[in-house]
Amino acid sequence: MMYHAESFAKDGFETTIIGYKGTTPTPSLLTAPGIRFQYLSTPPKLPGKLFVLLAPVKVAVQVLSLLYALIVVGRPPEFILVQNPPSIPTLALVQLASWLRGSKLIIDWHNLGYSILALKLGRRHLLVRVAKWFERTFGRNAYAHLFVTNAMKERLVKDWDLQGLKIVLHDRPPARFHHASATEAHELFLRIPPFLPPLSSEFAPSIRPPRSTIRTVVSSEHTLSLGADVFSGSSTPVASFRPDRPALVISSTSWTEDEDFGILINALKLYETEARKRATAKPGTKASLPKLLMVVTGKGPLRDSYMQKVLDMEHSEKWEWVRCRSLWVEAADYPLLLGASDLGVSLHSSSSALDLPMKVVDMFGCGLPVCALDFACLDELVQDGQNGLVFKSADQLANQLKDLLSGFPAEATKLDHLRSHFIVSEGFRTSVRTWLSWEENWNDVVKPLL
């Protein structure tokens, strides 16, 4: 949604972003001219056992807050763009606001709200059936419908008889997403908070900031000039990736029911077992496996329980080759963290089987290959064996991690093959293969509607 707002602003529109306080917006959005933020009142959190009884209270708070922002505040907008989900009560309210204020409504279909509710209550629950009716009824008519996949467009046009312009807008990352150089990675790992619990000296290589980080090292001739912004404006790549670094595998999650983090935990356990075997095997039998640092970004309700489970396994089973840590980084550092990683993992299973994981889009924008959990329309984004690998179980994911990281970092030939999908050589210059950025895609698809 932030990308849409920035694109509208760049096209000369006075743009108001309506939403809840929380994650800090990207710096480019904060500095873009013509953008202001209208924050909604935060709805009360509902205890699990009283969810059904107190849900109307939450809806009432949302209704009043959103109606005020849409109808009372500011001048009537030419366009109202809403992302779905959430569906209740948002879709009905934006329909009302667009009618009262004479605005053109654009619905950005990212998923189906009722399918997410079904994860909590079951598909046959009365509230789920009501939610589906609500979403179909108030989402049917709009000036334009944007879809993240062809599969979603085909399904909704057929089953819900959507009225208005219907256009597929595949997600793409902004141009700031790119493969990180060793210098950028060095600056990043000096800046981000330390891992908690800290990584033991038996697992991680020795670190002496600001000369070295867990991933990078600065040559001795540059050590004396190190400062807080030592690399800013430098045209010389003074940092390099250290050969004894652990493999950095990253996953981004909202820690909700539609992502089975247990698959990843079991895969890491299998990797630990295999790494131990190879460490004690006779030389030349199988390529060695590196230490694996699994970093999981994001916030959500299931984070604490899953992270405690994996930490308990690390201690009780005395893991030597794997560490899993949860890390929160600001929006400005997120692309750099992806670009400084070796491999991505997506556990997104799609409650509707019609959307695509934005995290994979971001990873591809940084030239990062991905192991992705399979579901119906994933092939619109991940081509198995070309830009990533597709798995259906913890065993498959563990085998993929072992195959891709064997011989890392010097001889990870299978990982290098996947990376080559994103790399093109231009004489002596190597760069990440270009694909349509968010800006280019938006200008081609959405701008002609305005």
Image (spheres, helix red, strand yellow):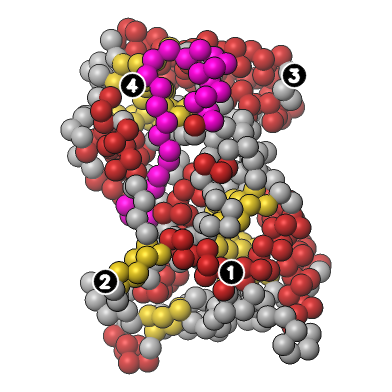
Which residue is the site of mark 4?
80
Cα distance in 3D space between marks 1 and 3: 45 Å
Cα distance in 3D space between marks 1 and 4: 46 Å
Residue 246 position by quadrant: bottom right
Q: Nearer the viewer, residue 329 or 4?
A: 4
Q: Amino acid at mark 2?
A: Ser
Cα distance in 3D space between marks 3 and 4: 33 Å
Mark 3 or mark 2: which comes first in sequence? 3
The quadrant of the rendering that contains the C terminus is top left
Q: Which mark is residue 414?
A: 1
Q: Is residue 156 magenta?
A: yes
Q: Position of residue 53 (x, y in %)?
A: 69, 17
Q: From the viewer's perspective, is the residue at label 1 or at label 2 nearer?
A: 1
Mark 2 or mark 4: which comes first in sequence? 4
Mark 1 or mark 3: which comes first in sequence? 3
Q: Which residues are magenta?
A: 151-177
Image check: 184 left or right of 126?
left
Cα distance in 3D space between marks 1 and 2: 34 Å
Q: Amino acid at mark 1?
A: Lys
